[in-house]
Image: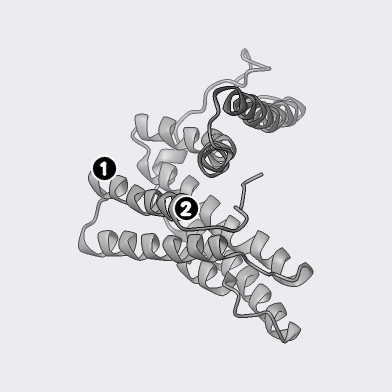
Amino acid sequence: MYIVAIGLGLPFFEKPFWLRVAAGAALVGAYVFYVWRTSQDPRGEHEAEEELNPLRLQPNLTTPYMRGVVVQLIVSLAAIVGGAQLFVREVSSLSELFGISPLVLSLIIAPLATELPEKFNSVLWVRQRKDTLAMRNISGAMVFQSCIPVTVGLWFTPWALTEAAIASAVIAIAAGLLLQVFLRTGNVLTGRELSSLGIFYAAFIVYIVCFYQGPVPVAH
């Protein structure tokens, strides 16, 4: 699904406009199908059924009140957003202080700041031997980011992608295809197989640093 969504987002739909609208509608439909298909998959249900830890704001209650859940959710989201912004701002200051290239910063530090909190959840689940939940957390984020924001771009912007953005999409498709090969040839993903996908990210950085001369896409 991720590979298909990335492919639909490539700049094949500059005109006519109705074709971009159709591509965006297909992406929304693909995301809805992914959510439905995942919800029907019984794998990982036993991992999600384990007893949850007490709510931080109501540690003495077995069943917390909904208002406490909502407040803790809002506080957690605010902490994630604020922490990411603070991280990027402070590291940017350090890059200027030590003369580190802003190019390297925008490619590595900014994406880490926005994705690290979410990926940390997957790390915690892996430590608890809840591999299915960990992978669904990552794959769900990937499918959402490749479907919904791209749909907004196709419908409401000129959707003029830079050379670097196209290169990143092509590399992401290549990495996704390799991941499919791993999944087709075995029932489990080994740490070595997952780590090998980092080669594609390293290749993208090498391409940007050594060959690309235009503006660099930055994750906000």
107 lies left or right of 46: right
Residue at numbered disc 1: 191
Q: Residue at x 67, y 17 (%)?
A: 58
Which residue is under mark 2? 139
Disc 2 vs disc 1: Cβ atoms closer than 8 Å? no
Is any part of residue 167 visible from this angle? yes
The percent position of residue 47, horizontal first and vertical second, equals 41, 39
The foreground one among 195 and 210 is 210
Above or below, 101 against 60 in this view is: below
Drawn side of residue 169 relative to residue 19, left or right:
left
- Secondary structure at numbered mark 1: helix
Judge whether 177 appears above or below 136 on screen.
Answer: below
Total of numbered circles in the picture?
2
Q: Which amino acid does label 1 sit on?
A: Gly
Q: What residue is drawn where x is 72% and y is 64%?
A: 152
- CA neighbours of label 1 inside 10 A, class few (<14), some (14 to 19), many (20+): few
Q: Which of 15 and 40 is in front in this view?
A: 15
* Of the pair 3 and 88, the residue shown nearer to us: 88
Q: Position of residue 136 (x, y in %)?
A: 46, 49
In the rendered view, how is the structure colored? one colour
Give amino acid for label 2: Ser
